[in-house]
Amino acid sequence: MEMFGQNVFNQSVMRDRLPKGVFKNLKKTIDEGLPLDPSIADVVATAMKEWAVERGATHFTHWFQPMTGITAEKHDSFLSPTENGALLEFSGKELVKGEPDASSFPSGGLRATFEARGYTAWDCTSPAFLREEADVITLCIPTAFCSYTGEALDKKTPLLRSMEALSTQAVRVLRLFGNTGVSRVTSTVGAEQEYFLVDKSFYLKRPDLMMAGRTLFGAMSSKGQELEDHYFGTIKERVLSYMKEVNEELWKLGVTAKTQHNEVAPGQFELAPIFENTNIATDHNQMVMDVLKRVANRHDMVCLLHEKPFAGVNGSGKHNNWSMSSNDGQNLLEPGHTPHENAQFLTFLMATIKAVDTYAGLLRCSCANAGNDHRLGANEAPPAIISIFLGEQLADIIDQIVAGAAKSSSKNADMKIGVTTLPALPKDATDRNRTSPFAFTGNKFEFRMLGSSFSISGPNIIINTIIAEALKGFADVLEKSNNFDADLETLLQETAKKHQRVVFNGNNYSDEWVQEAKERGLPNIPNTPEALKELISKEAVELFAAHKVFTEKEVHARYEIMVEQYVKTLNIEALTMIDMANHSIIPTAMEYATTVAASINAVTAVSGKLDVSTQKELLEELCGKLASMSSNAKALEKALENALNIADADKQAAAFRESVFAKMLELRATGDVLEKIIAAKYWPLPTYREMLFIL
Ligand code: ADP
Ligand code: MG
């Protein structure tokens, strides 16, 4: 397809436009993830500028991912003033290093405002691209963002570090299997993105959607998703033409948007790309979210990426399909055809099981934010308990390994590592467990807990690092071995025995599982403030330091930022609710009550004998709810004030969760009753019926 990648300064463009030696040097840098050789930076910058300018670009920007979880950019023009006018210029220095005045990005105390400078550095493993917006074309250079003392201020730097850690340990393990040719292992990700679309005219009348990204009030419509008629149903024309444009924009950017369909809830959709290396997949998922929003705007719609825009129907998540591939072309989670390949597969599989069980808390933490608190553990997304789905056949193999090869009789197939060939594993969709947070799907794992608004960087930093750690443990033992097959078998058996508890093939949504998980000793972390604490546990800090992913200082900075983001999110939501209650719902209820009262008077004036009991009942209910609405709004205000007065950040977050959030629920409940009893023509807010069904 001609369109594909046309806005990307990719390797084939580089090959065409760079001198041979320079291209070779750059390609080596990219393939091996090395820092850019400064001696070629000017040549690369000039080629990049010429390519961009030919396509109409006037500006360039270092495109980076601060800890807000979205992307940031600072645009500079290519113009350099000269004596007789201006010159289009772009130097190697500008390509390699930028200095945004970044004092207003969150740094968690890593960078005091007086030394606000941070710098951005080109991550040449991720190609530069052109962004077309209105009629402005901008050259975007994907960069890492660090403080002057070298601390990571972004989501990219630690991701690259975690990929490095995983590569180092995975290569060690592959060497033990006699593979001397491999020099790099890369984690790969395909991130499925869910989202909602609403008509812009409704959005603009909903302060909650505008301020908080989700409805804070709203009575459920008479129909929701119970008929299951939206899921994979025919896509409406307006949405189809939107998706077509989204795909075209993404293809131009080299993003392999592949499948799209209606999701479970009305107004909900999904887009899935083809998997790529995790760093690129992360950049591309940011572009996907950006393009989804921008194109929606052109179609007079708004794309909602919030995890739970509407109560009562499913929220949106992001499925992170994850695997590892080696630079000799193997997918390390693909079961092989020979016993030797299978032993290697089982080793990487077992490392994953061990990692997920040992660091379940960290995985849970990686998916924690205020929005996702509405999903995890509710009956639509995986529960807050981490477990692994393996499918019957693999689970049986693990059973056999635990039982010890010789003793196995269940399937009369003795499982002997390095000797037995695995049966072919089914990959079809029927074998999928849609309730599992971490499901093996034939040749990859699908981590299903992520929220739709997330940068996938955080969860992948955790996955890469914990699996690096498990592989390190294996390599440390096996490198000392004199009898590889026997020692591997013992190692896998011990590991399976210890960590099998995390494997669960049943229904994760059931109450029985919550009970059983408790008996198995698996953590069940209910909310964000609790989950975030996992990040700064002693074990986590040591883990990150050992693999050079985060220093202790960086971990604490991130923790601080995430706690603060949680508090800020709930604060905005609470303020918006109070505003909507006082300025919209309460006055509407009063107006309607006045009308009803007037109706009683008017009817009674005609004849005192006429029956006005319906009006009276309604008036009574209205006034009753009006009073609770007002007192609930005041209670929320009070709870908010108390929470804001707490100095200690952890205690403050807990107060927001325990008290502010609880008061928000009460206020909403009253507001939603009022919506149901007030005449439609008085109700000032677009309803769920309108927002969910009119597209
Ligand atoms: P489905 O779940 O709809 O059957 P697929 O199995 O094709 O779809 O894959 C779902 C997602 O997983 C896609 O984004 C796909 O590119 C991705 N994926 C497939 N193989 C891998 C892999 N080896 N590593 C990471 N992601 C992968
Ligand atoms: Mg999926």
Image: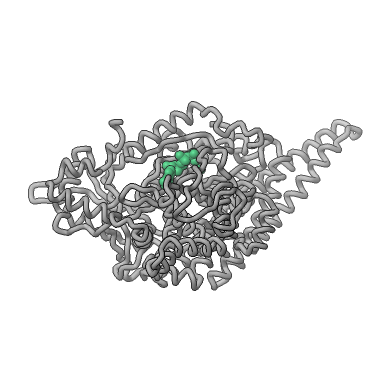
Residue 651: image location, x then y, percent: 58, 70
Residue 290: image location, x then y, percent: 40, 44
Q: Quadrant of the N terminus?
A: top left
> Which residue is pictured at 42% across the width and 54% down the height?
344
Q: Indicate left or right for 671 with 350 as reference.
A: right
**How many tags in the picture?**
0
Q: Indicate left or right for 439 with 347 as reference.
A: right
The relative height of residue 543 versus residue 291 in the rendered view (above or below) is: below
The relative height of residue 134 versus residue 177 in the rendered view (above or below) is: above
Residue 664: image location, x then y, percent: 64, 55
> Which residue is pictured at 74% across the width and 42% down the height?
594
Q: Foreground: 413 or 281?
A: 413
Q: In which quarter of the view is residue 69 placed?
A: bottom left
Q: In which quarter of the view is residue 431 placed?
A: top right
Residue 443: image location, x then y, percent: 45, 46
The relative height of residue 380 versus residue 118 in the rendered view (above or below) is: above
The quarter of the image that holds ligand 1 is top left
